[in-house]
Image (tube, rainbow, N blue to C red):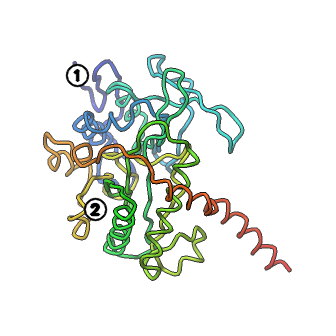
Amino acid sequence: MTGRSKGTESRDGVHLTNLDQPLYDGADATKRDLVDYLDAVQDRILPELRDRPLSVIRVRPGQEPFMQKNVPKYAPDWIQTVTVWAQASRREVSYALCHDWRTLLWFANQRAVEYHPTLARSSHGRSPVPTHLVLDLDPPLGAPFTAVARVAALVRQALGDSGLQAAVKTSGAKGVHIVVPLVEGLAFEDVAAATRALAARAARLDPALATTAFLREDRAGKVLLDSTRSGGATVVAAYSPRVRPGVPVSFPVTWDDLDDATPADFTIRTVPALVGSADPWRDRMPERQSLPADLVAEGHRIPVARVQAMHEGKRRKRARGE
């Protein structure tokens, strides 16, 4: 049941407020537009969030966007949570598990615009299980989207050479995510290793276009093949809006259409009509796959990009000081 009063409304028992306020500067959309969009795509986005510890990016009026991981103390008790040990911050984090429309609606009322689930599934006390391998293609500042599409084609070739298939979606920002669904039972460290090896193989196909260099100063205007989306990492969900001008959406595209794609065309205003009654992300996702032993073995010989970059950055800083 819905009741309205000057931007106040109730949907499915969730009290919504300030619906007619601008979502954020440059959004060209209101909070109501966000709620209506998520309502329209709930059957597509909820399967991407279910059973996965969820981080969100929220925007409050007059403040910079911020990422929220811990469920706030004022959250309703019907929101399910899972506690995960965060090694980096050495603390336990209580993440939400977004299983249903009511939970998603509550987050929308909190001005949660972006939805970043983990790449591992975790619920009912079970240990996390990695479910996808993801390469994040990040273009240099000012590069056209065609540059990303060309590097995505390299990744597709490297995947095919390794006997793997993937689905591809825009990130909702300026890059793309290439996603390989995995069979259950794979070790986190093996998935991470295979991701590094896949990035390296794609970069070797055309070093003038692609790089695995994590330090920005070493990329020389090339598209980064980011291999760090593994372990407890998150990636923005398919169909999730992004905090960008016009509220673009991370949206599935076909490999054949990638060259002609314009990510800015996929927004909270356009996507509901584009998908209609279909779910292109689900429909285009390949079957779950195992990882070739040679890909995993190669990856274990490649240093972790983020760790390697950290040590190299410290070395360069010391050298400049000397």
Q: At label 1, which amino acid type do we have?
A: Thr
* Quadrant in which residue 150 is drawn: bottom left
Q: Return the residue at label 1.
A: 2
Is 313 on the left or on the right of 214, as rendered?
Answer: right
> Disc 2, disc 1: CB below 8 Å?
no
* Image position, residue 80 (x, y; %): 47, 22
Q: What element carries label 2?
A: helix
Residue name at image x 38 percent, y 57 percent: 177
Residue name at image x 33 percent, y 52 percent: 250
Crowdedness near tag 1: few (<14), some (14–19) or many (≥20) residues, C-alpha within 10 Å: few
* Image position, residue 16 (x, y; %): 34, 28
* Quadrant in which residue 47 is drawn: top left
Is 316 on the left or on the right of 144, as rendered?
Answer: right
Which is nearer the eye, 146 or 200?
A: 200
* Image position, residue 277 (x, y; %): 13, 39
Q: Return the residue at label 2.
A: 264
Q: Is residue 288 above or below residue 80?
A: below
Q: Is residue 208 above or below residue 92?
A: below
Residue name at image x 47 percent, y 66 percent: 225
* Image position, residue 221 (x, y; %): 48, 80
Q: At label 2, which amino acid type do we have?
A: Ala
Is 63 on the left or on the right of 179, as rendered?
Answer: right
Residue 60 in view: no
N-terminal-most mark, 2 or 1:
1
Quarter of the image with the N terminus in it: top left
Mark 2 to mark 1 CA distance (whole Å): 32 Å
Q: Is mark 1 on a helix, strand or loop?
A: loop
